[in-house]
Image (spheres, rainbow, N blue to C red):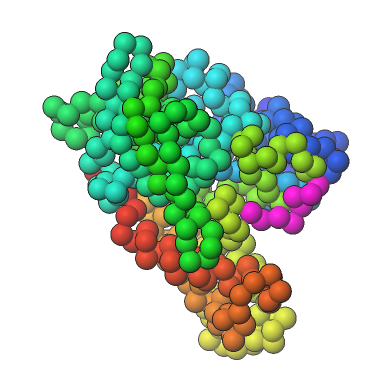
């Protein structure tokens, strides 16, 4: 695989591959197997770990070509976004071989077990304990704001393994089997009616010592890789786009369904998802359809939203391409993403007018933008209180 190719060459190469491999009659599992085998599920991973060794720009070209070809996206989720690159960077060869292929083909879904009721803004203050017992650790504690916990087979767990050292030095990063006795997942219902987050209770659950990722008491370093990937992905517009998406993992029950049934479905675990980049395109088209595209103030806000979203993508691409100079480009991306998300909410209300107060699938935009408005009102106020920092 050529990693020095241009974006145009990558686009043509993927289009040729898609023409030979995309089949709406295939199952979701079959389609994801093909993507993973070709290295297109997560093309930024190294070649030997299921990727193609692409830069962020080349991976973006694949994402655009994927949508242009009318294909369903790879198995988007926290496994692909966070777990796979973290395990690729810090996992042992055995862990990489065990976990990464099943993430890339969508067989297993992951969630993130970081935040706690008393450790949100100060992540290093986690109190969930992991105590060594022979070849296992016994874990007890509580996590909160866990996306996709109801579908996940595995969790990225931060737990305290040493209470006698400074807090950042006594944390270990584990791969936790979510489907074992002692793990309880409870949904946190939002005002949209969906449950985007969950709280997770861990009551003396068992984790093999072989599932420690990055070394005992070195979890803070590993967690920073995960958080950097998170901020970069969210700041640049999220995960790989496609003409539709399905939920990974066998627990969601979608792997054996016809992949063509998911075309046009932009779903996320816990309910519909609309990222800023997609919202901008929809808002521009909707403004023209509503006859308000010539409103000077609205045009200015749409232009500002579009520009800031592009700038954030470029900033993220620079950082992930090794050109970052401050070390906090990922944090800046997440901060600007929050700004553009709030702006998208406000512009959506302006474009929709009175229709912004209507709800349900029979309304304008099938209620998608209206749900985004309500979701953002709720979530942004919550994130402002609990979102943790990796800068300590």
Q: How many marks?
A: 0
Magenta segment: does it hold 262? yes
Residue 377 pos. (x, y %):
44, 70
Side of 191 relative to 75 (left or right) = left
Q: Residue at x 63, y 41 (%)?
A: 252
Viewer-proximal residue, 189 or 309? 189
Q: Is residue 22 visible?
A: no
* Residue at image coords 30%, 21%: 216
Q: Is residue 198 above or below residue 141?
A: below
Residue 355 visible, this orientation? yes
Is residue 54 or residue 127 the one in the foreground?
127
- x and y percent of residue 133 in the render? 30, 15
The reply to whether the magenta stretch includes residue 193 is no
Nearer to me, 21 or 123: 123
Horizontal arrangement in the rendering, residue 290 relative to residue 374 (left or right)? right
> Does residue 138 appear to the left or right of 358 in the view shown?
left
Q: Residue furthest front?
A: 181
Residue 348 percent coordinates (x, y) = 56, 76
Residue name at image x 37 percent, y 58 percent: 383
Magenta range is: 260-267
Image quadrant where one finds the N terminus: top right
Furthest residue toward left: 164
Q: Quadrant of the C terminus?
A: top left
197 up-or-down from 308: above or below: above
Residue 206: where, in percent of width, then height? 39, 22
Q: Residue at x 62, y 62 (%)?
A: 278
Instruction: Decide which of 69, 367 is in the foreground and name it.
Output: 367
């Amino acid at each position: 695989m050529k990693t020095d190719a241009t974006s145009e060459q990558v686009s043509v190469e993927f289009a040729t591959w898609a023409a030979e491999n995309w089949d709406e009659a295939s199952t979701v599992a079959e389609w994801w197997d093909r993507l993973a085998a070709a290295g297109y599920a997560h093309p930024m991973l190294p070649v030997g770990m299921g990727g193609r060794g692409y830069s962020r720009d080349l991976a973006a070209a694949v994402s655009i070509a994927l949508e242009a070809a009318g294909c369903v996206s790879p198995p988007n989720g926290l496994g692909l976004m966070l777990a796979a690159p973290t395990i690729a960077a810090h996992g042992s060869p055995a862990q990489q071989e065990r976990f990464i292929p099943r993430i890339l083909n969508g067989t297993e879904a992951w969630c993130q077990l970081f935040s706690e009721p008393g450790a949100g803004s100060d992540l290093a203050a986690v109190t969930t304990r992991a105590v060594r017992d022979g070849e296992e650790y016994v874990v007890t504690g509580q996590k909160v704001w866990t996306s996709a916990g109801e579908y996940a087979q595995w969790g990225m767990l931060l737990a305290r393994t040493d209470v006698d050292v400074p807090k950042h030095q006594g944390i270990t990063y584990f791969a936790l089997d979510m489907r074992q006795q002692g793990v309880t997942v409870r949904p946190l219902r939002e005002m949209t009616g969906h449950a985007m987050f969950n709280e997770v209770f861990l009551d003396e659950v068992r984790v093999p010592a072989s599932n420690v990722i990055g070394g005992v008491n070195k979890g803070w370093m590993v967690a920073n890789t995960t958080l950097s990937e998170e901020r970069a992905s969210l700041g640049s517009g999220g995960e790989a786009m496609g003409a539709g998406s399905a939920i990974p993992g066998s627990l969601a029950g979608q792997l054996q369904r016809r992949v063509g049934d998911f075309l046009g479905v932009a779903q996320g675990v816990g309910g519909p998802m609309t990222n800023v980049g997609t919202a901008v395109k929809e808002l521009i088209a909707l403004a023209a359809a509503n006859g308000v595209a010539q409103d000077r103030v609205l045009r200015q806000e749409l232009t500002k939203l579009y520009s800031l979203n592009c700038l954030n993508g470029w900033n993220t691409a620079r950082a992930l391409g090794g050109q970052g100079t401050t070390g906090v480009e990922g944090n800046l991306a997440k901060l600007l993403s929050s700004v553009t998300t709030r702006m998208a909410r406000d512009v959506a209300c302006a474009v929709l007018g009175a229709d912004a107060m209507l709800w349900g699938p029979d309304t304008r935009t099938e209620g998608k933008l209206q749900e985004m408005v309500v979701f953002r009102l709720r979530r942004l106020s919550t994130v402002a209180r609990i979102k943790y920092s990796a800068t300590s």
